[in-house]
Image (tube, coloured by chain):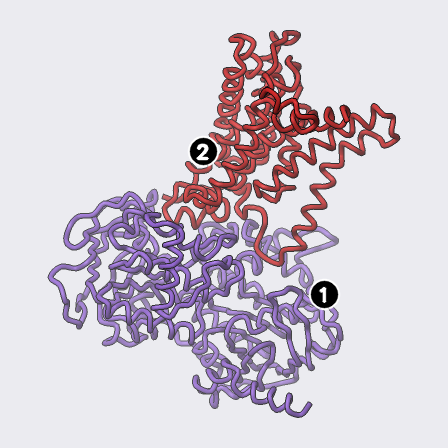
Amino acid sequence: MRDTTSAAPHTSATPLLQTVGLTKRYGSFLANDKIDLDVWPQQIHALLGENGAGKSTLVKAIYGLVQPSEGELRWEGQTMVLSGPSQARARGIGMVFQHFSLFDNLTVAENVALGLDGKESFKEMSARLQQVSRSYGLPLDPKREVWQLSVGERQRIEIVRALMQNPKFLILDEPTAVLTPQEADQLFVVLERLKSEGRAILYISHKLEEVKRLCDTATILRGGRKVSTCNPKAETAASLARMMVGTEIKEVKPAASREITVPRLVINDLNLEPDDAHGVHLKGISLELRGGEILGIAGVAGNGQDELFAALSGERLARDPGTIVIEGIAAGHLSISRRRKLGAAFVPEERLGHGTAPRMRLSENALLTGHAAGNMVQHGFVNTAATLNAVDRATETFDVRKAKRDPEAASLSGGNLQKFIVGREILRNPAVLVVSQPTWGVDAGAAAVIRQALLDLAAGGAAVLVTSQDLDELIEISDRIAVMFHGHLSASLPTAEASREKLGLLMGGSSLETKEQAHAADT
Amino acid sequence: MELIEAIILSVLAASTPLLLAATGELVAERSGVLNLGVEGMMIVGAACGFGGAWLTGSIIIGALCGMLAGVLMSLLFAAMALGLAVNQVATGLALTIFGVGLSGLIGARFVGERITPAPHLQIPFVTDIPLIGRILFGEDAFVYLSLALVAAVWWFLYRTRAGLILRACGDNHVSAHALGYPVLKIRMYAVMFGGACAGLAGAYLPLAYTPFFIPGMTAGRGWIALALTVFASWLPGRLVIGAYLFGAVTILQLHAQGAGIGIPSQFMSSLPYLATVIVLVLLSRARTGGSTAPAALGTVFVPDR
């Protein structure tokens, strides 16, 4: 174990928060094994680790949500025992949760009030909420209900709620996992400001570039143990990843040469009105995707990506069959199963509830997308052996880790479930794969496996359409990149020409807007 | 004129147990617990309420006995559905079946006995005002209590911090737990409140509505109360409108039969439920997102520690 501690000089003599030999056991499972962590004031301290490394358990202990089995917490040098989050909050510990701890049917102000300890009246609280949110440049309307808000706005509520307690110590659990690059940049500005105000921040992430850019110190966990504390700015992303995973992460390698073949997925001027008030109107979307190609679709969330996915998968039908052509056959009017029979496969963004039925076994989930083609159903009866076989194949090929042979989908970690879903579709040998956010909230090891699988699939002759908010991912695997904005799809750029700046401009709608203005001027 | 007054009086009396039981269930459901055992808690409340009043001669003690019985029944529910995380629907149905049987056992020795029913308010002159006098100032205490209770519940849910926390538990128990609120404890209190209200509603029947006890005298009112919370879309204010509407339909159906109007009584008794379905459809059409029902309603919660 090496300990190079942080390069930044400390402004105080004792760390603000320490965990000393902190251990948490669940039965015989050691979630945290003797973890020592020092966080100093005016420090952004990264907590790195793969899924299941024990990051969440550790911060839950610091926030008073779980009681350590052994070891102790120290606050400003003094031993601290927390029986619940309200005691943590009283000391000045705030937390922004990964899966937001918000209440959809309550207003913003009510949500914030629930995260405070109720010492001020609701009216005073609302006034302070507006003042805090304005002073940090995080605008919020206290009267709106949460279900009406975007993901970025929801995170703002969490952050403002934590800031309202004027915390000395703020924990952020994967805050950028759901944000666009622009939203993430805004968040970093806020975090830098909090740091300059003398607060300490514990920042959980597995986006290594982000950690290198933002954090002063990084503590790396693996399998419940601390591996190292280091200065991330002095490390490379590869060396950090190596410490996280324990072995070298395989670099994603595109095949040396790929044969670009016939058009397998063609969209011709697809127009689709939204089916609910919050939806996006798809306007004149056209693209051609050939075998052997990967096309990336970038864009800020909520610009029509979900609607495009629904139209391609057949969850929503196009009025004109010819607008979507799969393998040379007009498919706009075909059902999901019919499209699967044509050789298309779909991986939606949401793993639980859309990609899989959470409470059903993996074999049943394999059947749900595999029944249309293949041997899973014979004479109307389910061939259990075939469904189990599909699970085993996906498990072996994609290294899906699970407790038993055929568990419920919900019992798998995010990365493993995503590997299973992608594997389930790829093993059907699709001619066309449409995949949305393939590595959302997935650890680095699993993400590399999934990206490699997409590249291999394309190398085998399939056409792959990837929608992602992660520009680095798209640049890594795509041959061409197009951008969605307000329901329009830009022309695609070869990846070699697609710089982050260029894509960022398109994501902001700049060139498309000029086109629209020109169009408006014509008419 | 006399007839109208009589009808309104009987509507108020018929609606009060519905309003009491539904108010309690509304609080429980707002915390995220679906307790289908309202009918069971009511009927046990009726037996114990009558027993208490008959033994002591006091309506107040009778009412308290009814409430206590309802709370004990609800604790049985809480132990199973919250403590042991058993399916709430199954537990609630079992509670009703159990309650119907238990009330027969408790009430067996009271069948055929009579008590003096709860007195009605009597303010000299004021109560004698024609028509409105008796309707507004001549009711028994339960009627006023039920309306005060609705107002109190509204104030609690929307004007107090405790009410906000209770609603939060019903919306997302995982978040509530993550913020450090004791979800199961809060739900237990809400279920107990529901039990007390259901017990009181049951006790109202033999203490004020008819001054004797017969087995099965709640006659499905617990189920109407459940439908009523949905009809009111979990809003206390609408509960009052709904309860009087449902009460009115039950009474009108009797009068319609008495007057020989040729509408089958079965059709009339189905009207409240039909109205509930229509209201649900209208509500879901009117709202484009979010949910009117407490989002965590009926789901089991097991905290991780």
Q: Residue A262, how many percent across, how many down?
A: 65, 84
Q: Quadrant of the N terminus of chain A?
A: bottom left
Mark count: 2
A393 is higher (above) or lower (below) than A270: above
Which residue has dot 1 on it? Answer: A335
Q: Which mark is residue B189?
A: 2
Write the residue at 57% across / 50% down: A360
> Residue B9: in sight, yes or no?
yes
Q: Residue B89, how many percent across, how many down?
A: 59, 36
Q: Residue A204, how many percent across, how many down?
A: 33, 63
A452 is higher (above) or lower (below) than B89: below
Judging from the image, mark 1 belongs to the subunit labelled: A
Q: Residue A367, how many percent across, how many down?
A: 63, 56
Left or right for B154, reference B231: left
B74 or B93, which is in the foreground? B74
Question: Which chain is purple in the picture?
Answer: A
Where disc 2 sits, the SS reads helix
B305 or B24, which is in the foreground? B24
Q: Quadrant of the C terminus of chain A?
A: bottom right
Question: Which chain is red in the picture?
Answer: B
